[in-house]
Amino acid sequence: MPGRTGGTSPAVSRPGFARAAHTGAVGSRIIVAAALAALLAGCSIVPPTPALEPGESPPAAQTSSSPAAPASAPPVAAPVADPVPLPDAKQLTKALAAVSSGGVGTAAVVVVDPASGETLASRDDQPLTPASTMKVLTSLVAVDTVGPETTFTTAVVAPKPGRLVLVGGGDPLLTDKQSESAAKPASLQALAEQTVTALRADGVTSVRLGYDDSLFAGPTFHPSWKPAWKVYTARIGALSIDGGLESQWQAHSDPAKVAAVAFAARLKAAGIAVTKIAPEQPSAAAQPVASVQSAPLSEIVGQLLRFSDNHAAEVISRHVALATGGTPSFEGGAAAVTAWLKAHDLWAAGMRIDDGSGLSHKSKVSPSVLADALALVLVTPRWAAVAKGLPVAGVNGTLKSRFNDPAEKAGRKVVHAKTGTLLGVASLAGYVTTSDGAVLTFAAMANDAGRDSAYNWLDRTATALAKCGCRADS
């Protein structure tokens, strides 16, 4: 959607809006609602062939794909006597304008009907700092290009007898101790147990341990991020444990080495002596010893969106670069996401993608692009993981403690949206079901704002959508 500018323009239809063919506005809204209900119920929907074919997977030594599910048709809704009414654009715009934006320098909001692609309301649409709503775009591109069922492998290989190398495959959720979370099935604990079993079978009691995080390239800390953040912001690499963090307020300066030391400690505890730990890139002839697999990307995306995991977002951005033939770095990931968005007509003049997580103040995204991207998510089963991973107001993730004011009560359990917060910036992008049952996507962005003022405006704007019948005769 090139050339978008600010201003108010309700009920705008964009011919270039990339989406599957529809069977009419009312019928499409029924299908969107049915697909959404299936998604929230945890149903598996197998997608049609995407508009843009995914790129090649990363090398098999680091990445593998789970078997595809059997093909099945998307759900088809039965005819209903009373079709879901769409809000009147003028009434909707009026309801949004009634929400106070005091304390917010720039308050931009766009609302879209995902069934038709029609913009129902638009206020001050322009490229703004997205903060962590950037993760919606990064996740969407990753699910499409890398593949929702793709997993990432952390391996141990043996270049020669008595030598082991721990090889990072870019699992952003790898843990040291085995986790009970479905999103974190891979751990050094499980990897060490396999390795010890193999070593004992060969009669090996002492090893030299190398570690390899060469899958990714470039700096591990983004040049646009504030230097003061280095204390608690995880470095981005192909080998790290527990999100690259020692604690909530302390990041590892060398996460690959930390992972290797933790792995060595597990070998030693099992009676295997480790004589040396050092960086090492094994040759292709190194023999496999043990491996653990991450959760599918769809599960990882759900985790990173729900809890706004910056480290995971940057790691999957690098996987996007690998899958599309680019350099797996901050710059390469941003370039790959930018190219995909432009190819899918999800772009506006003045936009810039500077990182995958939204930590950079230099990224600029238009709310219309976010709202349109989410609209496409709701009508494209292949991308369902993005919608399913969004936090729910008052229920979970980064929205669990939001929407707690009486004026926002109607938004609880109804608003599904990704949050974003930086100094002077807050944003919210997702979907909501109106009081009449219409499913709408939206993006609201506050720049040059105090946090409390921004949160109040964002949450009450989303609540206004939830409460809105907004019919022409109301």
Image (cartoon, grey):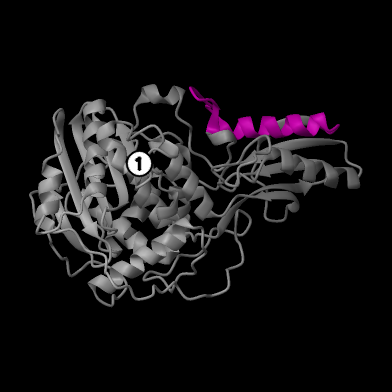
Q: Residue at x 29, y 64 (%)?
A: 343
Residue 24 located left or right of residue 250: left
Residue 313 visible to the viewer: no
Residue of label 1? 412
**Nearest the camera: 280 or 451?**
451
Residue 123 visible to the viewer: yes
The verdict on residue 245 being magenta is yes
Q: Residue at x 17, y 43 (%)?
A: 108
**Element at badge 1?**
loop
Query: Mark 1 is on which residue type?
Result: Arg
Quadrant (top left/top right/bottom left/bottom right) for the C terminus: bottom left
217 vs 324: above or below: above
Residue 100 located left or right of residue 408: left
Residue 339 located left or right of residue 182: left
**Nearest the camera: 263 or 165?**
263
Disc 1: CA contacts within 10 A as few (<14), some (14-19) or many (>=20)? many
Quadrant (top left/top right/bottom left/bottom right) for the N terminus: bottom left
Residue 54 located left or right of residue 427: right
The verdict on residue 351 being magenta is no
Q: What are the residue bounds of the magenta stretch?
A: 244-273
Q: Quadrant of residue 112?
A: bottom left
Q: Residue at x 29, y 76 (%)?
A: 21
Q: Residue at x 25, y 63 (%)?
A: 345
Question: In the image, residue 458 lies at what x, y percent?
Answer: 24, 38
Q: Residue furthest front?
A: 81
Question: In the image, residue 267 lies at what x, y percent?
Answer: 78, 34
Q: How many numbered callouts?
A: 1
Question: In the image, residue 50 lies at what x, y percent?
Answer: 40, 70
Question: In the image, residue 126 lies at what x, y percent?
Answer: 15, 47
Q: Quadrant of residue 310?
A: top left
